[in-house]
Amino acid sequence: MTVMDRPMLEGAAPSGAFAGFVRSGATIEMKAFTGVSGDAGGYAVPREVDAQIDAVLKGISPIRGIANVVKVGSAGYRKLVTTGGTPSGWAAENAARPETATPVFVEIVPPTGELYANPAASQAMLDDAAFDVEAWLAGEIAMEFAKAEGAAFVGGSGSGRPKGFLTQPTAATADGVRAFGTLQYLASGTAGDFSASPQERLIDLVQALRAPYRQGASFVMNAATLARIRKFKTSDGAFVWAPSLAAGQPATLLGYPVIEAEDMPDIAANALGIAFGNFRAGYLIAERAETVILRDPYSNKPFVNFYATKRVGGCVTNSEAIKLMRFSVS
């Protein structure tokens, strides 16, 4: 005796394991929620939802789009950086070859924290078959994660979260003189403002970055600072700002793209309001590949909470690859 396939009755749950889980708590693939409590329970976000979150993050959190992002499998990520290369020397054809110095290694350990979001929706809304639950969930989590990431990558303390590049030690000394991990700043020439020749100070900022790093470098500033710079003109009346001539291409300043990051400080006395550098070489973001989500329909009835977490770390890896402008006299 065979069993005929029956059509779905009106009002039945929609197909798709994840959709069924989000709407009703139906069982889907189960994985450990944390690395130390395997029996606590948890659920892995399907690949298609996690991909949506990553795509939105790159648009909202600008530092993620220009930094070096690596996927890690644990919290113990380490990176070795050489600070002086491998020394060498010259010798005549029949001269002795004395031993040269060995490279100096520095271990980089990006501070890591748990990034989380806890959006809620009423059960009545989730029961509505016309509601796109997955798109809503991806959008809510992406917005929460992007705002937290954007602030941490710029000004994070490094305690339970990434260490932002603006929280690194700074000095006015050039490359090769500063201690490793200290970023170089250039003074604008006026406390809390640009000098009388602001475009010249911007050129100095660009040229302070050595040529190997200028390939792929970009400016980073907030919208208020950018509005000031867009009004600058050269002596012949030409704007130093060059608008984009093609869709999808960023506008340029002195030939380099400009990234708007609203977490950058406004122009003020001693503020580090402009960054210029190759962030792919200078800033590292280390993150777990998966976003983990736990459905909680009990603690906040009649709402259903979706507790999502993602482990993210970040820090400066090459202090020569990023330069800052400080709005000060010196």
Image: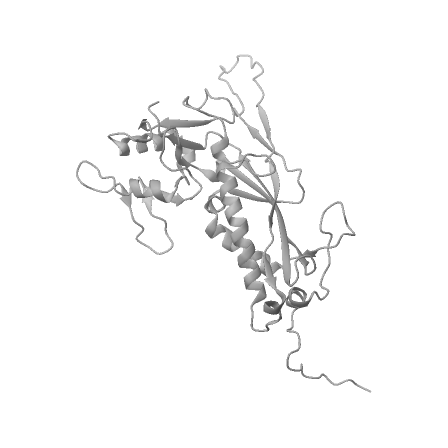
Please tell me which residue is depicted at 53% across the width and 37% down the height of the picture: 156
The answer to whether 54 appears left or right of 321 in the picture is: right
Q: Is residue 291 visible?
A: no
Say if 202 sits above or below 17 in the image.
above
Q: Horizontal and vertical percent for residue 69?
A: 54, 44
Q: Residue reaching furthest front?
A: 301
Q: How many marks can you see?
A: 0
Q: Horizontal and vertical percent for residue 51?
A: 56, 57
Q: How is the image coloured?
A: one colour
Say if 235 sits above or below 62 in the image.
above
Q: Write down the quadrant of residue 330 in the picture.
A: top left
Q: Residue reaching furthest bottom?
A: 1
The answer to whether 310 appears left or right of 62 in the picture is: right
Q: Quadrant of the N terminus?
A: bottom right
Q: Residue reaching furthest left?
A: 236
The answer to whether 132 appears left or right of 23 in the picture is: left
Please tell me which residue is depicted at 23% across the width and 42% down the height of the picture: 239
Q: Horizontal and vertical percent for residue 224?
A: 34, 42
Q: Write down the quadrant of residue 43 in the picture.
A: bottom right
Please tell me which residue is depicted at 43% across the width and 27% down the height of the picture: 184
Q: Write down the quadrant of residue 298 in the picture.
A: bottom right
Q: Nearer the viewer, residue 151 or 120?
A: 120
Say if 181 sits above or below 292 in the image.
above
Say if 186 sits above or below 305 in the image.
above
Q: Nearer the viewer, residue 211 or 264?
A: 264
Please tell me which residue is depicted at 38% across the width and 54% down the height of the picture: 248
Q: Nearer the viewer, residue 39 or 287?
A: 39
